Image (spheres, helix red, strand yellow):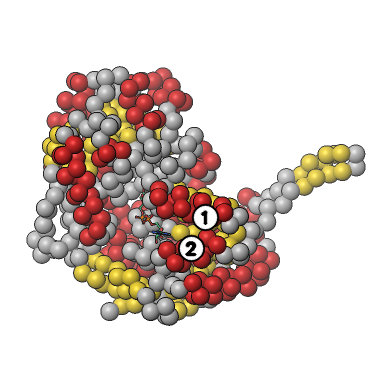
């Protein structure tokens, strides 16, 4: 059995806690490796090593740190095929999506290459008689990132690249479900010239997270994951005096106006709802057609489009999407499908019970489609995070727009229309963080600094 080690002070370190988590191949349902789960003492050691390493890294001038980022970028590009296969084998997303996962993270590494410019402070002459004032941007020290399973390359890179380029040391606690790619990225960063101990990867579960949240040498925490844990991390981190950003779950709506190009809408929504088996925080699992005519036409085309999707193993180049990440997650999604039926929604396509020949134990769920979903239903209110599209019919744009605005999750929303004025007004009024106009999957772009642009935080 392959063991996945921590990556500390520039080398693989065997976990000594005696606790391990199983890492599955979602295509087969078989355990393919085990990952060490750190004890509190191991996390303490990782932090102490990072404190030592950070001092020298912070003294290096920003141009030199940027050169390490350039080299890191080149190494990620050179190793993208290997990284994508590894990612796909533990996550279950198809290799093309795994490449996208890496590419989106790489964009933040590219952004971090401009750190000498980004770190420039401000200067104010004559703030008082004979007094000039200037500001400096300085590293915090050691900061930590706790990341989810669904983007095991993008999210660790989002969090770590800029923090590192600014002169911080970074402790990464990746998801224990697909931990290999974060380790591989840390190895590449070392090869790129990052000093030992500046990027530490500690695997673990709540025990490791709790140490990071309370440790006096951790100055800031970045978290992405489910909302309950995001709340917990936010509250605990704040209690211990840390800067915390915590991104939680999502339930993104796509509003379809009667004037929308329906062929394009169906193409967009089929990808946004079912791609990566719906395991994306920016997936679009709720479609809101406006008017009965729009709804009927959309439903008819959507059934065909969803039926046309190929579910396959993650290395199948023809597959639109692969298995979900774990047996527990498969069971959770399927229980939501049953709940939808029990709540009275109209099940048009049922993806339960899908077996792939030769991969009968894989965690596959076929495309599932519900019509006539109502806002009072729990299946509408909760995040399902699987290949399930729910249609909620609305009579007017106002009614449609109130759905995402009033929903507990406020991550993203999309409107499909040819009417520029309606789109503009919708974007201004809807109470959701990111708004797409004829764009189904909104992915934050490094230079627009997504969180700062949010009208509403995604933690709910
Ligand atoms: P998760 O909350 O189960 O796990 C996230 C991280 O928290 C992991 O590192 C995990 O080990 C840790 N963790 C889990 N339980 C914990 C506990 N009790 N105490 C402390 N730490 C704990 O999330 P997940 O299932 O890995 O990821 C999917 C979720 O992430 C979805 O809800 C999705 O919407 C969300 N997500 C949000 C964004 C965003 O930008 N808002 C992006 C990607 C994913």
- The image shows residue 82, relative to residue 375, as above or below, that is below
Horizontal side of 306 relative to 14 (left or right) equals left
Query: Looking at the rendering, which quadrant does residue 237 occupy?
Result: bottom right
Any atom of ligand 1 within 8 Å of the CB at mark 1?
no
Foreground pick, 144 / 226: 226
The residue at which mark 2 appears reads as 210
User: For the point 22% across and 43% down, which residue is it?
Assistant: 388
- The image shows residue 440, relative to residue 446, as above or below, that is above
Numbered circle sitting on residue 236: 1
Between the residue at mark 2 and the residue at mark 1, the CA separation in whole angstroms equals 8 Å
Quarter of the figure with the C terminus: top left
Any atom of ligand 1 within 8 Å of the CB at mark 2?
yes
Foreground pick, 49 / 20: 20
Camera sees residue 310:
no
User: For the point 64% across and 55% down, which residue is it?
Assistant: 116
Q: Give residue 425's position: percent from left, percent from top.
A: 43, 22
Dot 1: element: helix
Residue contact at pointers 2 and 1, CB within 8 angstroms: yes
Query: Looking at the rendering, which quadrant does residue 392 occupy?
Result: top left
């Amino acid at each position: 059995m392959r063991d996945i080690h921590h990556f500390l002070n520039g080398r693989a370190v065997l976990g000594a806690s005696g606790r391990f988590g199983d890492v599955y191949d979602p295509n087969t349902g078989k355990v393919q490796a085990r990952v060490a789960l750190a004890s509190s003492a191991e996390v303490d050691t990782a932090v102490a090593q990072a404190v030592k390493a950070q001092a020298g890294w912070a003294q290096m001038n920003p141009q030199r740190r940027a050169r390490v980022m350039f080299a890191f970028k080149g190494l990620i590009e050179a190793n993208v095929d290997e990284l994508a296969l590894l990612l796909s084998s533990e996550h279950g997303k198809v290799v093309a999506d795994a490449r996208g996962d890496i590419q989106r993270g790489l964009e933040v590494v590219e952004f971090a290459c401009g750190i000498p410019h980004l770190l420039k402070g401000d200067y104010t002459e004559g703030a008082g008689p004979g007094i000039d004032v200037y500001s400096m941007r300085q590293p915090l020290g050691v900061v930590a990132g706790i990341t989810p399973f669904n983007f095991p390359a993008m999210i660790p890179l989002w969090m770590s690249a800029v923090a590192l380029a600014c002169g911080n040391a970074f402790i990464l606690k990746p998801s224990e479900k697909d931990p290999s790619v974060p380790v591989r990225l840390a190895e590449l960063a070392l090869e790129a010239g990052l000093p030992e101990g500046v990027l530490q990867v500690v695997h673990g579960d709540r025990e490791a997270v709790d140490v990071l949240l309370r440790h006096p040498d951790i100055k800031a925490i970045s978290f992405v994951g489910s909302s309950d844990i995001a709340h917990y991390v936010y509250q605990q981190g704040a209690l211990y005096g840390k800067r915390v950003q915590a991104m939680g779950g999502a339930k993104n709506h796509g509003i379809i106006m009667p004037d929308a190009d329906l062929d394009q809408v169906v193409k967009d929504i089929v990808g946004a709802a079912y791609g990566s088996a719906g395991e994306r925080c920016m997936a679009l699992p709720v479609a809101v057609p406006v008017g009965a005519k729009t709804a009927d036409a959309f439903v008819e085309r959507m059934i065909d489009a969803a039926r046309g999707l190929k579910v396959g193993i993650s290395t199948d180049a023809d597959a639109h999407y692969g298995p979900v990440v774990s047996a527990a997650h498969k069971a959770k999604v399927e229980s939501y499908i049953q709940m939808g039926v029990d709540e009275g929604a109209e099940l048009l396509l049922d993806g339960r019970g899908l077996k792939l020949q030769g991969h009968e134990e894989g965690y596959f769920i076929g495309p599932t489609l519900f019509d006539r979903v109502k806002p009072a239903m729990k299946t509408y209110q909760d995040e399902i995070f699987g290949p399930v599209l729910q249609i909620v019919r609305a009579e007017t744009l106002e009614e449609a727009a109130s759905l995402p605005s009033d929903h507990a999750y406020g991550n993203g929303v999309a409107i499909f229309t040819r009417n520029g004025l309606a789109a503009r007004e919708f974007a201004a009024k809807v109470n959701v963080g990111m708004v797409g106009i004829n764009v189904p999957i909104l992915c934050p772009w490094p230079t627009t600094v997504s969180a700062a642009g949010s009208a509403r935080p995604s933690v709910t």
